[in-house]
Image (cartoon, helix red, strand yellow):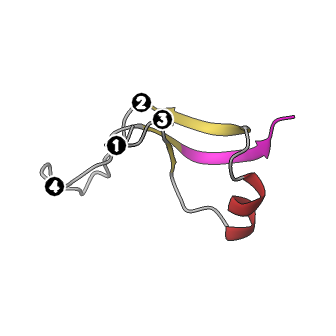
Amino acid sequence: MLDGDPRPRLFLQQPRPAGEQQQLADKRVRVTGVFHRTQPRPPDDPPYSATFSGSWIYDIIVLEPVR
């Protein structure tokens, strides 16, 4: 959860295309990928670098609306 944000957030590895974001905004979706409870650190990141807190999904294979 981000500070001051009442809704839980799930972060995706890469930015999604604008059309996909508009199509799926405020809808329930099914995501298939690799789930991490916290943001994974790249091996070359220094230990003092900033990270987001929250769950992350990497290597997304499918992102689709749920009916």
Q: Nearer the viewer, residue 40 or 16?
A: 16
Amino acid type assigned to the residue bearing label 2 in the image: Arg
Please give the range of residues in magenta. Answer: 58-67
Quadrant for the C terminus in the image: top right
| Quarter of the image where one finds residue 38 | top left
42 w.r.t. 31: above or below: below
Residue for badge 4: 46
Question: Does residue 52 appear to the left or right of 31 in the view shown?
Answer: left
Amino acid type assigned to the residue bearing label 3 in the image: Pro
Looking at the image, which residue sits at the far right? 67
Q: Secondary structure at mark 4?
A: loop
Q: From mark 1 to mark 4, how far is it between C-alphas? A: 28 Å
Q: From mark 3 to mark 2, how far is it between C-alphas? A: 13 Å
**Residue 45 on the magenta segment:** no
Residue for badge 1: 4
- The disc label shown at residue 37, or none: 2
- Residue at (51%, 52%) from the top-left corner? 13
Mark nearer the viewer, 3 or 4: 3
Residue 60: x and y, percent?
63, 47
Q: From mark 2 to mark 1, how far is it between C-alphas? A: 20 Å
